């Protein structure tokens, strides 16, 4: 008996047949001839020109980077822009890397300079960070204003300043030196010695980065920091025959652009920061270690340091509980310190000024867990007591100091007269 075998269509064939009936694209064409989505977007743009009312793919463009923004505005304004890169090869720190410097100039009296520390993994990251500093400082608006001024004289080509001497550079600078400096030559200005002494006196940190250009010419970057959030940069391109001339030139440039007034203005803040952090902060950290260990041998202050840009912030956690239930007090300082150690000492000092040491001493004297409400009251009491002590101290300081009794100095004549009286008394007693 012969079997009548009929071919049963597959699911794929059935679906393809149904799609063909309704005029849709078949599965085989859809799978094998499908174009990438990018091409579909391009075809949509061609078939739907601008202004036509249709709904389709939308292309979202990225905003230009800070580097591109500065380069575009300088090109439009025909203002000279130069990028420089350097690395801290002499540093033994693991965080050493690349730094970038940006110089936008019209002439030696009209320029803007920005720089970063050599702490970035590559040149691109350092360049972007440096450009961000310029954009935040208003470099785009400044370039636009300079470019729209027809009276601004543009800088000569690089070939005209190759191999410049220090004296020639000094003669091209505007004579805006501080009071008392009337030098007629670069040697008489003594810029490096003057500026370095002023920086040491006011606690300002200076970073010097040499630049190497073509034809074995040298330049330099001088970056001054009083706080990580407030710094200033001075740049001279590689146009000097040796490194020493480049360093002298960048100090002369800084003097002509008012670096002395800048240091005097910010130096007091840097000196105050140094005293508070290094002298008082270290002592307070030791006291916190001792008082926390008195609560429990395993109880220690916990410091958490964070970095924002080039500045450090810190948070301090202290457990005031003497039981298994933690009772944490937190203190924090903003990102305005040069190093992690500075931030730790600063937050410890802030905690001490808030009364944490008094609280720790009080907790040690009595058992049990201190409740939150009582802690806040005690913190307030400590702050009020300190305020009252300060007022009493100020009042006491304003009162005139008591006069000390002066010892009368007797002359030789008076001493001799007294000796004679004593001798006469003794003779009278003997004769009687």
Image: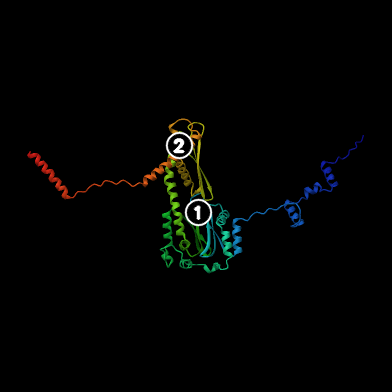
> Outermost residue toward the left?
431
**Residue 178 picture quarter:** bottom left
Q: In the image, which is nearer the foreground, mark 1 or mark 2?
A: 2
Which image quadrant: the N terminus?
top right
At 38% from the left edge and 44% from the top edge, which residue is drawn? 393
Q: Secondary structure at mark 1?
A: strand
Q: Earlier in the sequence, mark 1 or mark 2?
A: 1
Relative horizontal placement of residue 409, taking residue 182 as reference (left or right): left
Relative horizontal placement of residue 390, taking residue 407 as reference (left or right): right
Specify whether residue 146 is in view. yes
- Residue 257, image x, y percentages: 48, 62
Tell me if residue 242 comes above or below residue 29 in the rendering.
below
> Outermost residue toward the right?
1
Q: Disc 2 marks which residue?
A: 359
- Residue 406, image x, y percentages: 25, 47
Q: Disc 1 marks which residue?
A: 230
Q: Are marks 1 and 2 in contact (CB under 8 Å)?
A: no
Which image quadrant: the C terminus?
top left
Question: Tag 2: Cα neighbours inside 10 Å, few (<14), some, or many (≥20)?
Answer: some
Relative horizontal placement of residue 55, taking residue 331 as reference (left or right): right
Question: Tag 1: Cα neighbours inside 10 Å, few (<14), some, or many (≥20)?
Answer: few
At 11% from the left edge and 41% from the top edge, which residue is drawn? 426
Specify whether residue 79 is in view. no
Spatial CA distance of label 1 from label 2 is 36 Å
- Residue 212, image x, y percentages: 51, 61
Q: Secondary structure at mark 2?
A: helix
**Residue 72 picture quarter:** bottom right
- Residue closer to the observer: 74 or 332: 332
């Amino acid at each position: 008996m012969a079997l009548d075998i009929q071919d049963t269509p597959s699911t794929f064939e059935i679906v393809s047949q149904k799609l063909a009936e309704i005029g849709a694209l078949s599965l085989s064409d859809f799978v094998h001839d499908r174009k990438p989505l990018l091409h579909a977007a391009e075809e949509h743009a061609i078939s739907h020109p601008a202004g036509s009312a249709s709904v389709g793919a939308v292309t979202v463009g990225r905003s230009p980077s800070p580097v591109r923004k500065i380069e575009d505005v300088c090109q439009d304004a025909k203002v000279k822009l130069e990028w420089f890169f350097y690395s801290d090869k002499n540093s033994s720190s693991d965080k050493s890397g690349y730094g970038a410097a940006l110089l936008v100039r019209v002439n030696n009296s009209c320029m803007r300079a920005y720089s970063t520390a050599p702490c970035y993994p590559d040149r691109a990251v350092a360049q972007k960070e440096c450009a961000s500093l310029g954009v935040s400082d208003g470099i785009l608006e400044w370039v636009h204003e300079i470019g729209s001024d027809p009276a601004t004289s543009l800088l000569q080509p690089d070939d005209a300043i190759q191999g410049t001497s220090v004296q020639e550079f000094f003669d091209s600078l505007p004579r805006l030196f501080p009071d008392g400096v009337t030098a007629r030559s670069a040697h008489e200005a003594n810029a490096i010695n003057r500026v370095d002494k002023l920086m040491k006196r006011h606690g300002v940190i200076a970073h010097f980065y040499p630049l190497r250009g073509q034809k074995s010419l040298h330049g330099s970057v001088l970056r001054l920091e009083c706080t990580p959030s407030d710094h200033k940069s001075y740049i001279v391109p590689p146009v000097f025959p040796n490194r020493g001339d480049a360093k002298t030139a960048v100090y002369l440039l800084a003097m002509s652009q008012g670096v002395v007034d800048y240091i005097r203005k910010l130096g007091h803040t840097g000196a105050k920061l140094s005293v508070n952090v290094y002298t008082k902060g270290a002592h307070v950290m030791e006291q916190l270690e001792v008082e926390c260990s008195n609560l429990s041998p395993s109880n220690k202050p916990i410091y958490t340091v964070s970095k924002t840009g080039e500045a450090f912030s810190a948070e301090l956690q202290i457990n005031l509980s003497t039981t298994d239930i933690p009772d944490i007090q937190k203190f924090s300082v903003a990102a305005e310190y040069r190093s992690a150690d500075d931030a730790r000492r600063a937050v410890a000092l802030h905690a001490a000024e808030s009364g944490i040491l008094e609280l720790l001493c009080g907790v040690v004297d009595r058992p049990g867990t201190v409740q939150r409400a009582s802690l806040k009251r005690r913190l307030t009491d400590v702050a009020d007591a300190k305020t009252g002590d300060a007022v009493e101290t100020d009042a006491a300081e304003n009162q005139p100091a008591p006069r000390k009794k002066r010892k009368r100095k007797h002359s030789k004549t008076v001493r001799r007269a007294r000796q004679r009286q004593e001798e006469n008394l003794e003779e009278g007693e003997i004769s009687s």
